[in-house]
Image (cartoon, coloured by chain):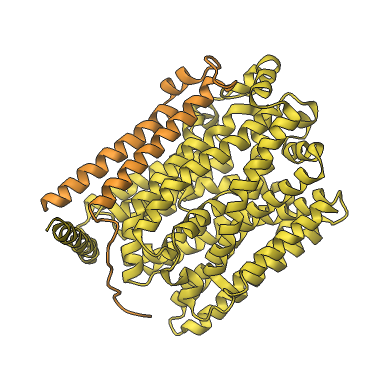
């Protein structure tokens, strides 16, 4: 496996882990139950809701960073040769 | 009068903007728009298809009754988008290279099995039927409510069907996506604006609405909500089930084959969560805020319509169009995917002599026949639609190991995929129908057990048999495309440096 491929795999693994970590924090029962409270409130919203919205926005930031790094490496401009027309 | 005119104007607008897309003449164009859709189309195509009209009736009713639990849609959306990001590259490369049109055709190629293609094609069609019925019913309900009963649900459904069948059958994916852009933009901009307006005009704003909830029904501000005792595992289970199953719907997945590049798909993943989080959060905040009101408590599924009617005729008109836009987006995507599956994944596999022209004709007539069948079903079985639609998620999650392991694990093979999929379905639907006590006790939904069954069988089968010979060729396609891309990127950087 080439060094570029290894680098790409490691980068993907890192971002998958980070995004899944945000999901883990919203779903794993002990953590989720810890956050499942009304106080402290923000703009009137319960903390439970702020927790889920905040982590989803954090996941969006990870998606953006992942995309930017992939874009820089050229992996989003793949040229595909068509095997055979139907 | 204003709401019904708004609905008719919106339907007219959808037909008008599609007037140049109606001359589709090949099956490839009908199914995938010849891989030509850009980021706007894929983003809104994804959002408009994913957002169902019932989200503003049934699912918002869930939040009206139980409060915060409705927010499960937000973490589940992130899991679904991660799945979309992960499957994008291989789906696009194999899709373009081998001219694939559907998720089932992709699985048929990956596992080199016509049986898997037909099986998953049939399952996709069968599991989509309840959603089609429910969305038809929602369209009829919108017309009925907006006209204060003047237009019956049946007539409302017929008006909706006439418009959707026309542009889907004539324009295929190109028409579906064009309409999705309008529907999605309306849902995000006008829809969000009208929800905010009602939150402020009827409930005094965000802080005031939440304060009222805090003093009158604090239980609605946390999981599981008032009057409901359920294990916290249930929260985890519905997010996993919906998150993994959410992108497995053929009507959502097939949009990937329409994209013009991987960049387009991945850019869509950047925009979709932000747009989705904002609009879903708004919808569920308003629904939760309605919880203390007696009318909303007694009629949770009607609560959002009622609140908009209280705000005036224009908010009701804008809201009715919002629900209509969400329903049309989903219905058109389902009809396009189902007709493509019936024509390409079932008819053309069973009879190889069917040519492309006949396949297109079969797809078009499938749209008409399915729509009329769904109209009858929606009218007769209205009371059971929600139950059936929610049950289908327990089946969709079973497909996720077949897709994800197929794309990421060379050892995944057709024996594991077929046995795993069939047994996973049996476990999932068996537990759903028999409802044994441990489902309630532990909180894990039947789909989770079905998913684990499929996963386990596929892993065991993968280690029991050698890697199938054709898999190397498929993996080589990916490696070649990547190496060409990185070489090209290095060359560009080199020329810029010099």
Which residue does the image show at 76% across and 39% down from the upper left?
A: B308
Which residue does the image show at 41% across and 46% down from the upper left?
A: B270
- Left or right position of B33 against A8: right
**Residue B201 vertical placement versus B385 (above, below):** above
**Residue B37 vertical placement versus B287 (above, below):** below
**Residue B453 vertical placement versus B167 (above, below):** above
In the image shown, does B171 or B350 lie closer to the viewer?
B171
Give the image location of residue B8, x and y in percent.
76, 61
Which residue does the image show at 66% across and 18% down from the upper left?
A: B211
Q: Residue furthest front?
A: B498
Residue B435 occupies which quadrant of the picture? top right
Give the image location of residue B152, x and y in percent.
84, 56
- Residue B369 in view here: no
In the image shown, does B272 or B403 lie closer to the viewer?
B272
- Left or right position of B185 against B33: right
Q: Which chain is orange?
A: A
Q: Quadrant of the N terminus of chain B?
A: bottom right
Q: Residue furthest right?
A: B150
Give the image location of residue B250, x and y in percent.
49, 59
Give the colour in which the image draws chain B. yellow
Give the image location of residue B207, x and y in percent.
64, 22
Residue B89 occupies which quadrant of the picture? bottom left
Q: Quadrant of the C terminus of chain B?
A: bottom left
**Residue B98 vertical placement versus B252 (above, below):** below
- Residue B79 in view here: yes
In the image shown, does B277 or B132 lie closer to the viewer?
B277
**Count of numbered circles in the view:** 0
């Amino acid at each position: 496996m080439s060094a570029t491929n290894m680098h790409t795999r490691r980068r993907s693994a890192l971002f998958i882990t980070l995004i899944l970590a945000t999901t883990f924090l919203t779903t794993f029962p002990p953590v989720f139950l810890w956050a499942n409270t009304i106080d402290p409130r923000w703009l009137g919203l319960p903390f439970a809701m702020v927790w889920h919205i905040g982590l989803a926005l954090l996941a969006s930031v990870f998606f953006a960073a992942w995309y930017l790094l992939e874009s820089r490496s050229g992996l989003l401009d793949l040229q595909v040769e068509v095997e055979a027309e139907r | 009068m204003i709401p019904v005119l708004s609905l008719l104007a919106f339907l007219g607008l959808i037909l008008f903007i599609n007037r140049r897309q109606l001359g589709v003449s090949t099956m490839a164009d009908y199914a995938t728009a010849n891989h030509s859709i850009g980021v706007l189309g894929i983003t809104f195509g994804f959002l408009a298809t994913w957002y169902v009209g019932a989200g503003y009736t049934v699912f918002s009713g869930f939040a009206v009754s139980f409060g915060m639990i409705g927010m499960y849609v937000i973490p589940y959306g992130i899991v679904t988008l991660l799945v979309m990001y992960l499957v994008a590259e291989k789906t696009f490369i194999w899709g373009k290279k081998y001219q694939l049109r559907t998720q089932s055709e992709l699985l048929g190629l990956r596992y080199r099995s016509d049986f898997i293609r037909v099986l998953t094609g049939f399952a996709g069609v069968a599991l989509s039927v309840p959603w089609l019925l429910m969305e038809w019913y929602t369209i009829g309900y919108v017309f009925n409510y907006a006209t204060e009963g003047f237009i019956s649900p049946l007539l409302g459904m017929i008006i909706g069907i006439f418009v959707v069948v026309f542009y889907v059958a004539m324009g295929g994916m190109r028409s579906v996506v064009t309409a999705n852009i309008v529907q999605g933009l309306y849902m995000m901009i006008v829809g969000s604006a009208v929800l905010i307006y009602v939150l402020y005009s009827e409930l005094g704003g965000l802080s005031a609405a939440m304060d009222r909830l805090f003093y009158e029904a604090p239980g609605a501000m946390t999981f599981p909500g008032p009057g409901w005792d359920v294990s916290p595992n249930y929260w985890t289970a519905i997010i996993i089930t919906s998150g993994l199953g959410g992108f497995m719907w053929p009507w959502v997945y097939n949009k990937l084959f329409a994209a013009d590049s991987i960049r387009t798909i991945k850019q869509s993943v950047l925009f979709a969560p932000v747009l989705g989080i904002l609009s879903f959060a708004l919808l569920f905040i308003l629904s939760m805020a309605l919880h203390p009101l007696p009318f909303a408590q007694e009629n949770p599924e009607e609560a959002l319509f009622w609140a908009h009617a209280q705000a005036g005729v224009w908010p009701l008109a804008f809201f009715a169009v919002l629900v209509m836009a969400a329903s049309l987006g989903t219905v058109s995507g389902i009809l396009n995917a189902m007709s493509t599956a019936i024509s390409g994944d079932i008819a053309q596999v069973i009879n190889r002599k069917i040519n492309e022209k006949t396949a297109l004709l079969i797809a078009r007539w499938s749209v008409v026949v399915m729509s009329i069948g769904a109209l009858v079903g929606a009218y007769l079985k209205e009371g059971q639609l929600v139950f059936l639609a929610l049950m289908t998620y327990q089946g969709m999650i079973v497909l996720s190991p077949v897709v994800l392991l197929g794309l990421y694990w060379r050892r995944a093979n057709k024996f594991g995929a077929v046995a795993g999929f069939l047994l996973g379905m049996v476990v999932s639907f068996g537990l759903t129908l028999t409802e044994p006590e441990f489902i309630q006790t532990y909180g894990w939904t039947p789909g989770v057990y079905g998913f684990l069954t499929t996963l386990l069988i596929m892993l065991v089968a993968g280690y029991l048999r050698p890697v199938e010979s054709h898999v190397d060729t498929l993996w080589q396609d990916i490696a070649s495309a990547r190496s060409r891309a990185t070489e090209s990127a290095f060359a560009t950087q080199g020329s810029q440096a010099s």
